[in-house]
Image (cartoon, helix red, strand yellow):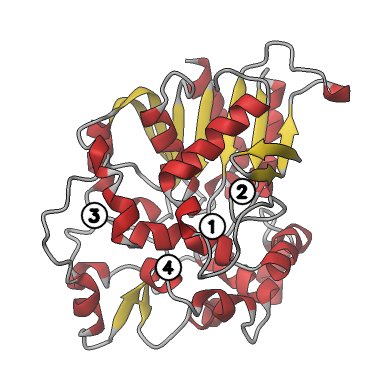
Amino acid sequence: MVGGINGLEMHLLEAGFETGGAKTRGRPLVLLLHGFPELAYSWRKVMLPLAAAGFHVVAPDQRGYGRTTGWDARYDGDLASFRLLNLVRDALALVAALGHRSAAAVVGHDFGSPVAAWSALIRPDVFQSVALMSAPFAGPPAPSSGAVDRLHEDLAALARPRKHYQWYYSTRSADADMRRCPQGVHAFLRAYYHVKSADWKQNRPFPLKAWVAAEMAKLPDYYVMDLGKDMAQTVAPEMPSSAEIAACLWLTEDELRVYSMEYERVGFQGGLQWYRCRTGRSYNAELDVFHGRTIDVPACFIAGASDWGPQQRPGDLEQMRSACRKLSDVRFIDGAGHWVQQEQPAEVSRLLLEFLRR
C-alpha cells in the first residue's frame, strides 16, 4: 500500500525492485493501468517478463477498485473524483510517491487506456511513452455543437429494442444487478470474461460505419444490450460448461476467485463511476479545452484479434493515427479477445518489450 496518492491509499503490485524498501537502482518505471471489471492482478502475467528486462513494473488497483481506499463508494457520493483529469492526477501522484520523476511508459487496457492516453497527452514530460490496449484514443473531443445525440432513443425504438452498455452502467441499478445477481458474482464474472474472450467463437469483429442505431445494433449483446435485460442476464446464457472452464488456462477458477472475492467485498460501483463521468456531459466538457492537442510521445496499440473493443466507437481506430503523432504499431493478436494481456501474455510481453526497447 502507498498512501498520499491524491487522497487515496493505493494498493499495488510491484516487480523489479530491491528488497527492504530501498529505491530501485535506476530501473525505468513502467506503470500498468487496468480496466473494468479488473484489478492490478490483471497484469500478473506480464509483470515478471518486463521486470526481467530491467524495468520497475507497477500495477495499482485504480480509484474505485479492489484494495485501494479513500474513494467514495456511494452512487450519490463524490462522482467528480472519478473524472478523467483526476485519474491522471492519481497516476502522477503515484509516480512521485514511488520515487520516480518520470515513467518510461504508461500502459493502459480497456478503461485504463484513456487514462494512459490522457496522462501522455497532458504530461509528456512525465509519461515518456504510451501503450494502449483494446480501447483506441481518438483525441480530445471537439466543443459541443449543441446537437442532440439520438442514438439511445433510436436504439430503444428498434424492432428489437436495445440499449448501450455504457449508459446502462451509468444507472443506479447496475451495481446491484451484478453484485446481487441470481447466479452469484463468481459465475457472473466467469460468463462475462468468457463472452468477451477469444473462447467465445462468435466474436468476429468488423468496422462499423457510423454512430447510428442500425450500425451499433450489430455489436454483440454485451455491448448493445436488450432493453429489458441487465448485464448479468445478458451474459448468463453464454456461461461456459464445466469442461470449458477446466480448459480455460488463461483464467483458472483460482485466478477468477481473486476477482470475484474482491467484487463481492467492495462491489462494482467504484468502476461504474468512471462510466458515469464518461456518459455525463459536464465532465466531458472540461476535456474539450484540449481539442486539437495530440499525443507527441512514442505510442503503440495492442488488441486481441477477437476483440470488439477497437470497433465499438466507429472511426476511433482510424482517428488514433492522427491523435498519436508517433504511433509506431497497431497490432492485433490471434487467439485473444478483450482480455489480451491475460489471454496471450507472452505475445503482449514481447510486443511491449519490443516497443520499450525502441
Q: Left or right of 203: which side holds 189?
A: right
In the image, which is nearer the foreground, mark 3 or mark 1?
1
Nearer the camera: disc 3 or disc 2: 3
Q: Residues within 10 Å of mark 1 (few under 14, many from 20)?
A: some
Q: Is residue 278 left or right of residue 92?
A: left
Quick check: 70 above or below 218? above
Q: CA distance from mark 3 to mark 2?
A: 26 Å
N-terminal label among 2 and 1: 1
The answer to whether mark 3 and mark 2 are in CB contact below 8 A is no
On the picture, is 240 further left or further right than 318? right
Q: Visible in this render: residue 347? A: no
Q: Which residue is mark 3?
A: 314
- Disc 2 is placed on an element classified as helix
Percent position of residue 31, x then y = 58, 32
Q: Which label sits in the foreground, 1 or 4? A: 1
Q: CA distance from mark 4 to mark 2?
A: 19 Å
Label 1 residue SS: loop
Identify the residue at the far right of this view. 20
- Numbered tag placed on residue 36 in the rendering: 1
Left or right placement of residue 21 versus residue 326 in this view: right
Tell me residue 110's x, y (percent): 47, 50
Residue 202 - label? 4
Which callout, 3 or 1, points at the residue further toward the start of the chain? 1
Q: Nearer the viewer, residue 282 or 187?
A: 282
Q: Secondary structure at mark 4?
A: loop
